[in-house]
Amino acid sequence: MLAAALLCRVAAAAPPAGPAPDEAAAAWFRSLTIPRSGESCCNLSDCRRVEYRIGPGIYQVFIRRLAPDGSGFRGGNDDWWNVPPDRVLRRSNPTGEAVACWSSGQGVLCFVPAPGT
């Protein structure tokens, strides 16, 4: 499923490492849309599993820089980013982990918390 997360990278990004993506998971990543605009999070940014924490009334995600193994985000900077409340998607999450879609120009576009949070 990690490979499915990497599938949502923009065309200029490095190809995903690992096995071929599961088509059902890939479809789920492609279905993520930015609230209000309805634009695909996946077409505009990298979407990946992320570390996260919950602060007073806000989620934060850890955005790692792109590593040689393909983990991390293009333009990332190894730092915590606040998730705007209107970018939190409350929906099913088949990955079992938190997922963020992030753009170096726009920050967090979408965030799906881990199941049960």
Image (cartoon, rainbow, N blue to C red):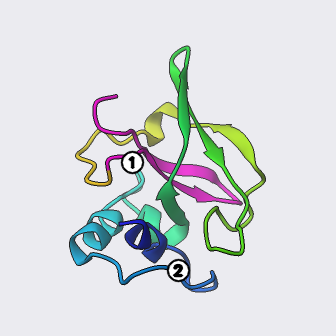
Residue 110 relative to residue 84: left or right = left
Relative depth, front residue between 73 and 91: 73
Q: Indicate the quadrant containing the C terminus: top left, top right, bottom left or bottom right.
A: top left
> Is 105 inside the magenta-drawn segment?
yes
Residue 16 relative to residue 77: left or right = left
- Up the image or down, 100 lies above or below 69; here it is above
Name the residue at 42% across, 39% down.
Answer: 88
Q: Position of residue 116 (x, y in %)?
A: 28, 30
Q: Amino acid at mark 1?
A: Pro
Give the residues in magenta.
96-117
Q: Position of residue 20 (x, y in %)?
A: 36, 84
Q: Indicate the quadrant containing the N terminus: top left, top right, bottom left or bottom right.
A: bottom left
Label located before the other in sequence (2 or 1): 2
Q: Secondary structure at mark 1?
A: loop
- Up the image or down, 64 lies above or below 68; here it is above
- CA distance for labels 2 and 1: 30 Å
Q: Residues within 10 Å of mark 2 (few under 14, many from 20)?
A: some
Name the residue at 45% across, 36% down.
Answer: 86
Q: Amino acid at mark 2?
A: Ala
* Disc 2: which residue: 17
> In the rendered image, which quarter is residue 90 located in?
top left
Name the residue at 71% across, 68% down.
Answer: 67
Relative depth, front residue between 38 and 13: 13
Name the residue at the right extreme. 77
Relative depth, front residue between 21 and 26: 21
Q: Residues within 10 Å of mark 1 (few under 14, many from 20)?
A: some
Marks 2,1: beta carbons within 8 A: no
* Disc 1: which residue: 35
